[in-house]
Image (tube, rainbow, N blue to C red):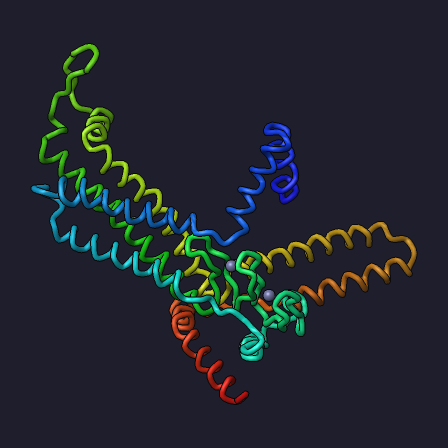
């Protein structure tokens, strides 16, 4: 899969575009994916603030007037939620993820010392770029060029990594946005249903613009009529539905991981190791079947035992539950700051 994405696809594009244009294209890709640029943040502001203003103008101020199923209480709730979302975005961008440096290195190593299993996380592994001992569960981010404590992933929306100290802001960011989009979609349905009832569209007759024939209302005709009359509002409701579904799944996925005390990075790393050990076991078992001499059999059996030992050393996932996990996520950054402060005082 990796080879297909990183070798085959670029080769095909290179053939289609030619050498020179391909190089410009590649530089663009490198800039977009591997440099710390603000393009996605600008895009967020345009879509989120722009989307809210469109909803406000065409929905809250226009279609919510005299609508039997929505009121300006919904306007107030929706607008307050939007403000919460913008604030959560600002917080997620502002607070740092827990960057490890020489001064705080010891605190972070101690914090996660029980996670060194010498398979996924090796004790005394160094980050050559930052010149520090890598704490378990940390990772050096290529885009930010720093080591981040309990690294989750690098998030282009907030233009920084998501790690131990800003994970709570990131979780708040996605949950508030998921709720806002879901609420926007729910209000959209109520508002549109209000228009259908108020204008008695279910009993109405429509005239075909081409044949001038009178047609009895069907759901298809009503949908076309509504979209034609309220294009901007319905467009923004569809955006809310799509984003609402995606963000709700994303938020639930993070809550699920919080309940297991794990991160996106760890989930991938763990499954890479486990897959590797499974493949290795399968390969050795085949070898064992083909082995003839007692010496060969002994050698393969030793290797199999070593693979099994490594596999068993990987720390199993802890089911701590969402509630306990959330409490930890929301409290630990302050506790960590406290530990770093004490450590600094000791040094002085
Ligand atoms: Zn590093
Ligand atoms: Zn990063």
Please tell me in which quadrant of the rendered image residue 276 appears: bottom right
Q: Report x, y in % for residue 117.
A: 64, 71
Task: Say which residue appears at 21% left-offset and 57% top-offset.
Answer: 80
- Is 28 drawn above or below residue 252 in the view shown? above
Query: What residue is shown at x 16% (from left), y 51% (from top)?
Result: 74
Q: Residue furthest top?
A: 211
156 or 300: nearer the viewer:
156
223 relative to 242 in the view: left or right: left
Count of numbered badges drawn on the protein: 0
> Please, is residue 277 above or below residue 333 in the view?
above
Decide which of 1, 283 is in the foreground and name it: 1
Q: Residue at x 35, y 45 (%)?
A: 243
Residue at the left extreme, as displayed = 66
Give the image quarter of residue 191: top left
Give how far across and how far down residue 101 sits, in percent. 56, 73
| Closer-to-camera residue (183/173) | 173
Where does residue 1 sit, x and y in percent of width and height? 62, 42
Vertical relation: 212 (above or below) 243: above
Front residue (pair 172, 30): 30
Question: Residue 118, image x and y in percent?
Answer: 67, 70
Q: Residue at x 56, y 61 (%)?
A: 145
Q: Is residue 290 left or right of residue 17?
A: right
Tell me: 4 left or right of 74: right
């Amino acid at each position: 899969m990796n080879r297909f994405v990183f070798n085959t696809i670029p080769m095909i594009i290179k053939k289609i575009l030619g050498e020179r244009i391909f190089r410009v294209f590649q530089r663009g890709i490198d800039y977009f994916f591997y440099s710390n640029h603000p393009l996605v943040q600008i895009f967020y502001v345009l879509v989120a603030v722009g989307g809210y203003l469109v909803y406000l103008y065409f929905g809250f101020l226009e279609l919510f007037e005299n609508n039997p199923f929505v009121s300006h209480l919904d306007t107030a709730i929706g607008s307050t939620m939007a403000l919460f979302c913008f604030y959560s975005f600002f917080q997620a961008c502002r607070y740092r993820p827990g960057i490890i440096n020489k001064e705080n290195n010891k605190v972070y190593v101690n914090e996660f010392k029980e996670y060194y299993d010498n398979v996924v996380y090796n004790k005394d592994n160094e980050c050559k770029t930052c010149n520090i001992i890598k704490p378990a569960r940390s990772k050096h981010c290529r885009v930010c060029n720093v080591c981040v404590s309990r690294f989750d992933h690098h998030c282009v929306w907030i233009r920084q990594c998501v790690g131990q100290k800003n994970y709570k802001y990131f979780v708040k960011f996605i949950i508030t946005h998921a709720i806002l989009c879901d609420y926007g979609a729910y209000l959209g349905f109520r508002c549109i249903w209000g228009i259908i009832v108020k204008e008695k569209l279910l009993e109405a007759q429509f005239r075909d613009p081409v044949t001038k024939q009178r047609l009895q209302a069907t759901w298809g005709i009503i949908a076309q009529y509504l979209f034609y009359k309220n294009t901007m509002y319905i467009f923004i409701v569809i955006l809310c539905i799509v984003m609402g579904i995606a963000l709700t799944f994303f938020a639930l996925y993070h809550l699920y991981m919080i309940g297991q005390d794990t991160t996106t990075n760890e989930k991938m790393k763990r499954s890479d190791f486990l897959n590797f050990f499974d493949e290795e076991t399968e390969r050795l078992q085949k070898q064992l079947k083909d082995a003839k001499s007692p010496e060969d059999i002994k050698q393969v059996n030793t290797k199999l035992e070593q693979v099994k030992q490594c596999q068993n050393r990987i720390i199993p996932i802890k089911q701590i539950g969402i509630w306990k996990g959330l409490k930890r996520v929301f409290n630990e950054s302050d506790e960590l700051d406290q530990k770093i402060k004490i450590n600094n005082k000791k040094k002085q």
